[in-house]
Image (cartoon, helix red, strand yellow):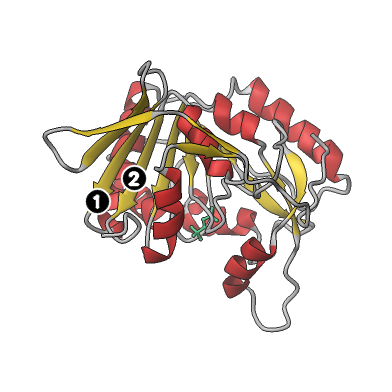
Amino acid sequence: MGYIQNANMKYSNFYFVLKLNLWYTEDCGFDYITNESGYFTVKKIVCDSYEDVCSYAADIYAAQLKDKPDSVLGLATGSTPVGLYKELSRRYSKGEIDFSKAESFNLDEYYPIDPKHPQSYDYFMRENLFDKINMSKFQIPNGGAPDPIAECTRYDSEIDKAGGIDLMLLGIGLNGHIGFNEPAVSYPAGTYLVNLTESSIEANSRFFGPGEHQPVTALTMGIGHIFKSRKVLLLISGAAKADITKKLFEGKIHTDIPACFLLLHPNVTVIVDKAANGE
Ligand code: PGA
């Protein structure tokens, strides 16, 4: 918490191997990866298309909210969840899904940024989801807070007060980041101020106009909140993500690929389209 990572920090390529087994069920859309004890299990679902990824993910949300209407949802930004948010909004407008008792916490936000700035994640979430559904309690780290460290502490205590996250939605960066947990040697557990890597700055530059100021730091939930989430849903789409997807499913815990930590979580579903699966 209140920890600033050095984006230029040299990290080691140290990793250890979990001895994962991989097998297929009768539906070749499903793979399960588990270690020999069967304790660490990641469910991988391969869909034909991005639309199918979003529809499958929306089914998981619908089931979650049916089972526990007051679920605490962890939400993500970026291109990947846009189709899911569209599908959730569509289902809400048809009366198929109800968010009235749910609440949400977003993973991250640029810092500093005015929450009303069109490139803020606050703005993104309102445009893509919050303005279209009936969820009244949603929180995003405040990119406009005067003291980022105090904001991180506040955000952590709000997540704790809500009882932690039931279903955490994630995308993955080309560099393996989850939220803005960038490749590093160590990862703070709570929300922290992070220096973005060149890779993330470059990947997100497409959203900023020429000459428009692009933040190079952000507030992000740490690995601890992600890890403590009761269920994790990781969506991966597009050929550009095929390399990082392959690395993730090699079953090695690379300390410099933050998403690898998900292999240790007991309830992770990864939904990939064929392009991201290298097919
Ligand atoms: P993307 O970003 O969905 O825009 O590819 C994912 C991420 O960086 O987490």
- Residue 232's label in the rendered image is none
Q: What label does residue 47 carry, if any?
A: 1
Query: The N terminus is located in which quarter?
Result: top right
Q: Is residue 245 left or right of residue 130?
A: left
In the rendered image, residue 141, in percent from the top left (x then y), is placed at: 70, 44
Residue 95 image position (x, y, % from top left): 29, 41
Q: What number is the disc on residue 271?
A: 2
Q: Nearer the viewer, residue 234 or 134?
A: 234
Badge 1, how many Cα within 10 Å: few under 14, some, many 20+? Answer: many
230 shown above or below 15: above
Q: Position of residue 2 (x, y in %)?
A: 83, 38
User: Would residue 193 appear left or right of 255 to someone viewing this image?
Assistant: right
Q: Quadrant of the C terminus?
A: bottom left
- In 3D space, how far apart are the residues under numbered discs 1 and 2 (Cα atoms)? 7 Å
- Picture quadrant where residue 60 is located: top left
Counting from the top left corner in percent of width and height, residue 133 is at 43, 46
Report if residue 19 is visible in the image: yes
Q: Earlier in the sequence, mark 1 or mark 2?
A: 1
Furthest residue in direction bottom, as rendered: 210
Circle 1/circle 2 CB separation < 8 Å? yes
Q: Secondary structure at mark 1?
A: strand
Q: Is residue 136 visible?
A: no
- Residue at 58 percent across and 24 percent down: it is 164
The residue nearer to you, when weighing 179 against 39, is 39
As shown in the figure, which amino acid type bears the numbered disc 2? Ile
Query: Which residue appears at 20% of the width and 43% of the height?
Result: 29
Q: Report the front residue among 47 and 104.
A: 47
Which picture quadrant has residue 157? top right
Q: What's the residue type where badge 1 is placed? A: Cys
